[in-house]
Amino acid sequence: MPMDENTQSKTVSAMPTAQEAADAALAQSSSRVFVDGSVGLGVDIVKIERMKRILEKTPSFPQKVFSSAEQAYCNKTANPATHYALRFAAKEAVVKALGTGFSNGIWVNDIEVVRSKGGRPVVKLSGRALEVAQEQGVREITLSLSYTHTDAVACALAVTEASASAAEKRKDPMEELAKQFKETRSILDEL
C-alpha cells in the first residue's frame, strides 16, 4: 500500500525520539529487581594529554594526589603521564564502585594503586575510603587498567560479602545434573 504524505508524516511523528527511547529502555531496566549493595562497578577514563598538561603546569600535583610509591612507579616509566592518568582513573573508578564519589570525607590519597608480586594492579584503601568499604561489607576491589595512545581507562569492581555468599549458594547446573543422574541410576540398579 503506497504511503501518501499524511501517512508518512504520521509514521515519522509516531517514532519515538532518542530521549523517549532512552527513557523507555531505562523504565524497562529499572523494573528488574537487583540486590542493593551487593556489587559496585566503577569505570573512568582520563585523557593522557590532559594529565601531561596538568603535570607540566602544576609540578606539585603528584605529591598532592599520589602516594610516594605511586609517584616512584610512574616516574620510572618511559611515559609517566600515562601511568599517572591510569592511577587517577583508578581512584575515580574505585569511588564510583563504592558509590560515593569523592565525598563523605574520602580523599584521593585514601586510594592507592599498588602492584602485586605478579605485577597486577591492586587497590589499597586507607582512611575514610577504607571505613566506607568496611561499612558496605566490601571484601575485595578488583581493578583493571588499560590505555591507548590517548586515553587511560580503569574499571573497579567492589565485591561485598553479600554478593560472595550469594555466589557460593548458587548451584552448579552440571553438579545438579550429575546428582540427578546418580539418583536415577541408583533407582534403576535397585529394579
Image (cartoon, grey):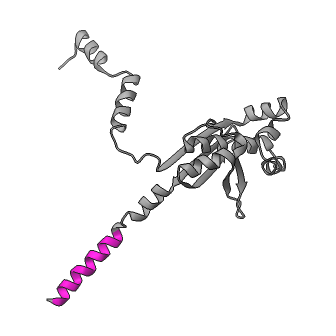
Q: Which of 95 and 88 is in front in this view?
A: 95
Where's the N terminus, which quadrant? top left
Say left or right for 54 vs 156: right
Q: Is residue 99 above or below residue 22?
A: below
Say left or right for 93 vs 114: left
The mark tally for this picture is 0
User: Can the viewer see residue 109 in this picture?
Assistant: yes
- Determine the residue located farthest toward the left in the rendered image: 191
Q: Residue at x 35, y 32 (%)?
A: 27
Answer whether residue 180 is magenta in the image: yes
User: Can the viewer see residue 147 in this picture?
Assistant: no
Q: Residue at x 70, y 64 (%)?
A: 118
- For the magenta stretch, what is the residue range? 174-190
Where's residue 16, x and y in %?
33, 22
Q: Is residue 134 above or below residue 171?
A: above
Q: Is residue 161 above or below residue 147?
A: below
Where's residue 125, x and y in %?
67, 50
Q: Which residue is drawn at 51% across and 54% down?
A: 160
- Determine the residue located farthest toward the top in the rendered image: 6
Q: Nearer the viewer, residue 132 or 32?
A: 132
In which quarter of the view is residue 83 placed? top right
Q: Which residue is drawn at 30% across and 76% down?
A: 179
In which quarter of the view is residue 121 placed? bottom right
Q: Nearer the viewer, residue 110 or 66?
A: 110
Answer whether residue 168 is magenta in the image: no
In which quarter of the view is residue 183 placed? bottom left
Where's the C terminus, which quadrant? bottom left
* Magenta highlight: main SS: helix
Where's residue 188, x and y in %?
18, 85
